[in-house]
Amino acid sequence: DAGVIQSPRHEVTEMGQEVTLRCKPISGHNSLFWYRQTMMRGLELLIYFNNNVPIDDSGMPEDRFSAKMPNASFSTLKIQPSEPRDSAVYFCASSLAHSITDTQYFGPGTRLTVL
Amino acid sequence: AQSVTQLGSHVSVSEGALVLLRCNYSSSVPPYLFWYVQYPNQGLQLLLKYTTGATLVKGINGFEAEFKKSETSFHLTKPSAHMSDAAEYFCAVSDQRGGGNKLTFGTGTQLKVEL
C-alpha cells in the first residue's frame, strides 16, 4: 500500500511568492496532520484535521499560513507571501482515526527553501 | 500541557554496545508515549508506543522502552547497536485534550554508531 504522499519533495522559491504544499493521506485514514521541522524549533504541529474538518490550528504561525482539506484524499498547506524564515521541512502525517492510540504515519516531507 | 524532554541531542555508541536514549515527560494526566525514528531525508517512523498495560514495550528493530511513572521517564534501549541504527530519535507524548491524538515531540537525539 502507498504511504503518505507529499509533493513536491523540494521547493525553492523567492521571498514574497506563494507556496503550496500537497499531501495525499493513506487511503481510509480520517485524520491528517501538518508538521514543520526546523533546527531551531524542532518538530512542531501546525494543524490537524479529522474527517476533513480542522480540529486544532493553534500551531499555525500566522495569517500567511493556511491549510485546507477539500476531501478525504487531499490536503494543501499554503504560504502567502513566503518569507526566508519559513524555510523548513514540512511533513504531512495521517492516522486511521482520531483515537489517542492511533499511530501517525508520516510522509517523506517537503523541503522548502525561501530565498 | 504535556511535554517531553530528551537529554542529549547527540549520542555516540560503538557497534554492538548498548543504546540508551533518554526521555522524561511532564503530564497532568496518564500519558501516552511514543518513540519515532527518522532516517536521513525521510519522514518519521513509529518505533513503539506505550498506552496502557505492560510498562515494558517492545518495538521494531530490537528496540524497547520502559514506562516508569515514579521517574516520569520513557527511556529507549537496544542491547546491541547496529550501524543501521544511526538516525535521529524522537520521543513524543500524546495530548489527550479533546480526545484526539495530537502529539508533542521532544527535540530529538541524533544517534551515531561507530565501528
Image (cartoon, rainbow, N blue to C red):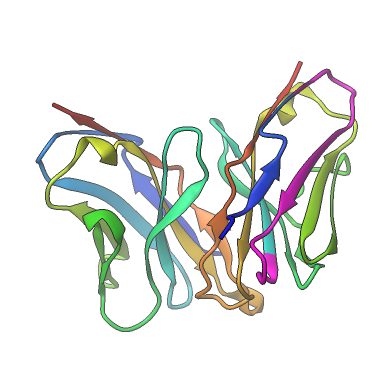
Q: Is A61 in the magenta? A: no
Q: Residue A107, position in %: x, y? A: 59, 48
Task: Please tell me which residue is depicted at 27% across the width and 38% down the height of the picture.
Answer: B84
Task: Please tell me which residue is depicted at 26% across the width and 75% down the height of the picture.
Answer: B55
The one nearer the camera, A19 or B67, is A19
Q: Quadrant of residue A21?
A: top right
Q: Quadrant of residue B113?
A: top left
Quadrant (top left, top right, bottom left, bottom right) of the N terminus of chain A = bottom right
Q: For this view, does A55 lie left or right of residue A90?
A: right
Task: Please tell me which residue is depicted at 53% across the width and 72% down the height of the picture.
Answer: A102
Q: Is residue B75 above or below residue B114?
A: below
Q: How many marks?
A: 0
Q: Residue B36, position in %: x, y? A: 42, 53
Magenta stretch? A12-31
Q: Residue B92, position in %: x, y? A: 46, 58
The one nearer the camera, B5 or A3, is A3
Q: For this view, does B55 lie left or right of residue B115?
A: right
Q: Is residue B75 above or below residue A84?
A: below
Q: Residue A42, position in %: x, y? A: 54, 40
Quadrant (top left, top right, bottom left, bottom right) of the C terminus of chain A = top right
